[in-house]
Image (cartoon, grey):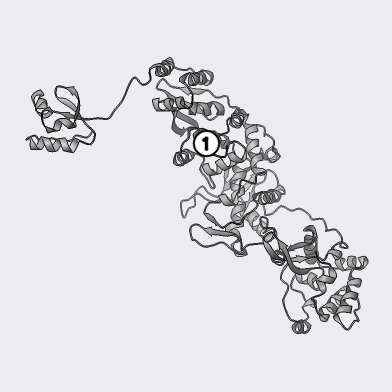
Amino acid sequence: MPGLSQSLQERDLGHLRITAELWGVSLEALETRPALQRLEELLLDPDRVSQVVGDLSDPARAALDDLIRQQGRMSWSLFTRRYGEVRVMGAGRRDRERPYLDPISAAEILWYRALVARTFFDTPKGLMEFAYIPDDLLLLLPAPQSQVQIALGRLASSAERLRPRPASDRILDHACTLLAALRLGLNGDEIDRLASDWDSGPNQLNAPELMTLLSTAGLLDVDGLPQPEATRLFLEAERGQALAQLARAWISSLAFNDLRLIPGLVFEGNWQNDPLQARRAVLDFLFDVPQKTWWSLPAFVAAVHEHHPDFQRPAGDYDSWFIRDKRSGDYARGFDAWDAVDGKLLRFIVTGPLHWLGILDLAQPEILEPSTGELAAVTAFRFSEWSTQLLQGQPPEGLPLEDARLLAGSDARLRIPRLASRAARYQVARFCAWDGEKDGEYRFRITPVSLSRARQQGLTSAHLLNLLRRFTQNLPPSLVKALERWEQRGVEAHLEQLTVLRLATPELMQTVRSSRASRFLGELLGPTAVIIKPGAVDKVLFILAEMGYLGEVTLQ
């Protein structure tokens, strides 16, 4: 960064004399250049620097310390947003109004004392204007005063925490469902229908979000299909270990872009954000929130807005990200749109990933908004009993064992409790048709179609029988027999929906079969009943009418 001399060279003689006066030194030079040289000598005296900094007001000292912590520079927009504006005025007005004697901000105090300067620096995004401390002066400044870390926000009120929603490990069950669906090759609509059974609530986990997380955790390949070995290890791991694996993946991920997953926002253009930087900032803010204490989410968001608004925008840039509100179509640009983007990101991280991964409990004032009937917004959070271990990437204690047994019926239906082996459910799903989730159980049907699909993947009914014998309680002998016969003989029974023409007498049947209608008739079912070929009902009725017989269609 520039030194003091370069920082002051654009300032007129009157400004230099103001700076000297505020430093308590005499500047007798009558021309700008010698005045600048003399002022530089006077200001770079360590004892004098210490005295001037020591005499600063608390707000001005806080602003200076903040700059020092940022290695001496900060975007001008961020600096003035945090510490107030520096009024722009010509030399004549300045000398008349003497703003340095009654500064309106901490920034203006530092500006007239030459402790802060202003210029443009080159950045990866192009030239940007910065506030900075001259290099040679920065070396002489005392270390920043220690900051007392105070949690952002306040305790939640009783109304804000009226309806608790404890964290859970259900994401493991949903992950198993999604992995099995992907392995079966289900399409997006089918997967979305499966995900519709997942827990409801604000920021409900959906399939695309979970796919992104599973990919981040190394469980999916570039085509979005399960990696066989990684998936096996994940599903066979104890629940605590599996939950910690997902938490570690999210905490350290550059690929999981929380901002781009916020519902209701549309992202346009080629700009890039840093999701890892934003996530770490949010976790740092949460670090000071008391454990086992309900904390107000609206107050937390408001406090971040006041004290750390640029947590995901280090340069304070609110204009180059093209983000549009999906409902209104309006662009959310400028600092005035902070709550529509940055505030939403805070709420999403707290009520989304941190809740899905079992780290935060949530609470609402009511389940539904009285005026709209929609789900009420989350208004409070607290750290769960698993949070300490999960935030350190360690398996939490106290998660249930997966020791429930599969339930098989003689009707070829399977019920798999949530706490049965995830690995077993994943494998069994490959042989079955899905029947949804109900009462804490995953339900499946064994059908010829599902067995044929499994056979195409190199799986036989013997594989399924081995799984069922290992994990099922009381495997019905009739189901064993049915699977063994299907493997040997395929389908031995067919159910069809047919349209049947019934006539009054066998003689009438012979007449109809000898008419033009014969080409629309199929297999005889008896002396007075015959199958009508698909799509031919109207044609047969028309020909019967021409022959003098009126027919009717009976629906059952």
Give how far across and how far down residue 371 sits, in percent. 47, 55
- What is the quadrant of the N terminus in the image? bottom right
Left or right, 419 with reference to 110: left
Q: As rendered, which of 9 and 195 lies closer to the eye? A: 9
Looking at the image, which residue is at 75% across and 69% down? 119
Taking the image as drawn, is residue 148 in sight? yes
Q: As rendered, which of 222 and 236 lies closer to the eye? A: 222
Please, which residue is most extreme toward the left here?
A: 548
Residue type, mark 1 in image: Leu
Would you place residue 4 above or below residue 413 in this image? Answer: below
- What is the quadrant of the C terminus in the image? top left
Give how far across and how far down residue 408 sits, in percent. 46, 22
Left or right, 501 with reference to 381: left
Give how far across and how far down residue 354 sits, in percent. 62, 44
Asked where in the image residue 420 lies, by quadrant, the reply is top right
Taking the image as drawn, is residue 24 in sight? no
Looking at the image, which residue is at 59% across and 29% down? 232
Would you place residue 417 above or below residue 144 in this image? Answer: above
Q: As rendered, which of 224 and 14 lies closer to the eye? A: 224
Crowding at label 1, few (<14), some or many (≥20) Cα neighbours within 10 Å? many
Looking at the image, which residue is at 46% across and 20% down? 461
Asked where in the image residue 120 lies, by quadrant, the reply is bottom right
Asked where in the image residue 213 lies, by quadrant, the reply is top right
Looking at the image, which residue is at 76% across and 72% down? 108
Would you place residue 53 above or below residue 312 in this image? Answer: below
Left or right, 470 with reference to 72: left
Query: Number of numbered discs present?
Result: 1
Q: Which residue is mark 1?
A: 178
Give how far across and how far down residue 347 sits, in percent. 60, 51
